[in-house]
Amino acid sequence: MLPHRFDNLKRIIGLLGLALSLVLLQGCSAVKLAYNNLPELSYWWIDGYADLNEAQSLKVREELARLQQWHRANELPRIADLLQKIQRLAPIDTTPEQVCSLFAEVRNRIDTLLSQAEPATVPLAMTLTPSQLVQMEAKHNKSNAEWRKDWVNGTAAERQSKRLKAAIDRAEQFYGTLGEPQIAVLRNSIARSEFDPQLSYAERLRRQQDLLQTLRQIGPNAPAPVPTMPQVTLALRAYLERSVSSPNMVYRAYADRAVPESCKTFAQLHNSSSAEQRERAVRRLAAYERDARELAAQR
C-alpha cells in the first residue's frame, strides 16, 4: 500500500540496519521464515559485501541477534498497528496527501531501526580494512552492471515497458489482477514521469564512492590522528544525511518531486480499484498484521 519510491530508502546507509530492513520488507508469505532467520540471513548479506574476518563475524552475529530482539519487542507491534491503520483506509478512496502521510510513517520506522543499529555499525566501520573495502567496491561494480542492464541500457520504450511490468507486479500482490483502467493509470504515470536513468545512476555512483571514502577516513588505515568513536559516529551520520539528501542539488530536486508524484499515482490506482480488489488488499494487509503480531509475541 505504499509507493514504489519507498524502495529508494533501502540504500546502503548502514550495514546492520540495511540488512535488517531489506528482509523485513519482503513479501507476506516469507515474513515469518525470513524474520526468524534474520540474523543469519543478514550476516551472510553483510559478509558478501565486506568479507568479514573472524572477530568481525562474531561481533556482527551478536549485534544482529541483539538488534532482532530489540526490533521484535519494540518495532513489530508498531508495524502491526500501522498495518491495521492502513487496513481501515483500504476500503475507501484516498488522496495523495494521505498516501504520503503513510509513507512518512514507514520512513520513521526505518529511521528508528537505523538509529538502533548505529552503536554496532560504528565499531564495525572502524575495523574495515583496505582489502575489505576493495571487496565492497567490487560488489558495487557487479550490482552496478546489473542496474545499468535493467534501467540504463536499451531504448526509452523498453525501459518504460520494464517499469510498467514491475509496477503491475507490485500492485497485483495486493489487488489481484488489474483491469485495463488501472493499467492505464500506471502506464500514464510512467509516461509522464521524470525518471532519469543517467541522473539516478550518477547519484548511485556518488553514494557508493562517498561511502567508501568515508570508511577509508575512519578505518584502521585512516590518516593520523586516529579518529575517535564520537568522530566516527559523526562521520557516518553525515554520510547518511548525504545519502538521504544528496549534495547534488539537481538530483535532490528530482528526488523531491518523485515522492509526491508516486503518492499521486498510488492514490489514482487505489481509487480506480473495485470493491473486490479492495477486499483482497484488506485481507493481504491483515495477513501482514497477523504475522507481525505473532512474531512480536515470540521470544
Image: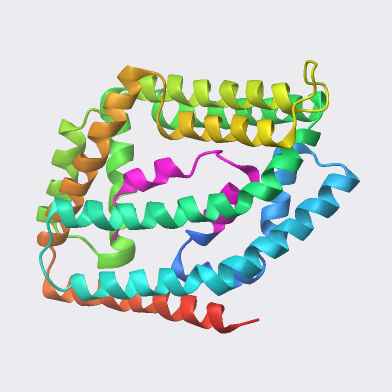
Q: Main secondary structure of the magenta part?
A: helix
Name the quadrant containing residue 175.
Answer: bottom left
Q: Is residue 260 above or below residue 213?
A: below
What's the magenta region?
1-23
* Viewer-closest of 273 and 202: 202
What residue appears at the point 60 percent right and 72 percent down from the top-left corner?
A: 33
Q: Position of residue 253 (x, y in %)?
A: 27, 25
Question: In the shown orientation, is residue 68 left or right of residue 10?
Answer: right
Q: Position of residue 136 (x, y in %)?
A: 70, 30
* Viewer-closest of 146 and 140: 140
What residue appears at the point 34 percent right and 69 percent down from the top-left corner?
A: 82
**Extreme-right residue of the structure:** 54
Name the quadrant containing residue 267.
Answer: bottom left
Q: Is residue 164 above or below residue 199?
A: below
Q: Is residue 76 above or below residue 110?
A: below
Q: Position of residue 58 (x, y in %)?
A: 85, 54
Q: Quarter of the image for the N terminus: give it.
A: bottom left
